[in-house]
Image: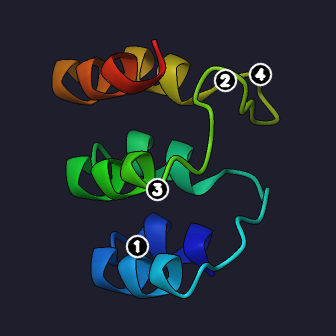
Amino acid sequence: ALSYASSKGYTKIMNILLKAQAKMSYSKPSALVQATERRDVRALSLLIRKDLQDAEHTFESDEMNAIHAASANGNIEVLSLLLQHFG
């Protein structure tokens, strides 16, 4: 559910799920990577605050993690946010 909410940018739903201690599913792509690819700073901030995933070690099927995805998208704000927390 968390991954789906992240893919749609539903940060209020994400917050409710996280407060209910929703388990992180490791579906592909992960909530962290989906938020990164969408350049959704609010969703990323929420996921980072909950420290659910390690951006350096969560690889998708194409061998990209959130830091790779942010670099590929060229979004400096998202990349900086990820590197601040995980770098």
State the scheme by which the image is colored.
rainbow
Q: What type is the residue that disc 4 sits on?
A: Glu
Task: Measure the C-alpha gap from mark 1 to mark 2.
Answer: 20 Å
Sooner in the amino-acid sequence: mark 1 or mark 2: 1
Q: In this picture, is 86 found above or below 66? A: above
| Quadrant in the picture for the C terminus | top left
Answer with left or right where residue 50 lies relative to residue 74. Answer: right
Q: CA separation, marks 4 and 2?
A: 4 Å
Which residue is nearer to you in this view: 87 or 64?
A: 87
Q: Nearer the viewer, mark 2 or mark 3?
A: 3
Q: Which residue is mark 4?
A: 63
Q: Earlier in the sequence, mark 1 or mark 3?
A: 1
Please name the residue shown 72% across and 73% down the image.
Answer: 23
Asked if the residue at tag 2 contacts the one at tag 1, i.e. Cβ–Cβ closer than 8 Å, the answer is: no
Q: Which residue is mark 3?
A: 50
**Residue at (62, 32) in percent of width and height:** 54
Q: Position of residue 70 (x, y in %)?
A: 40, 24
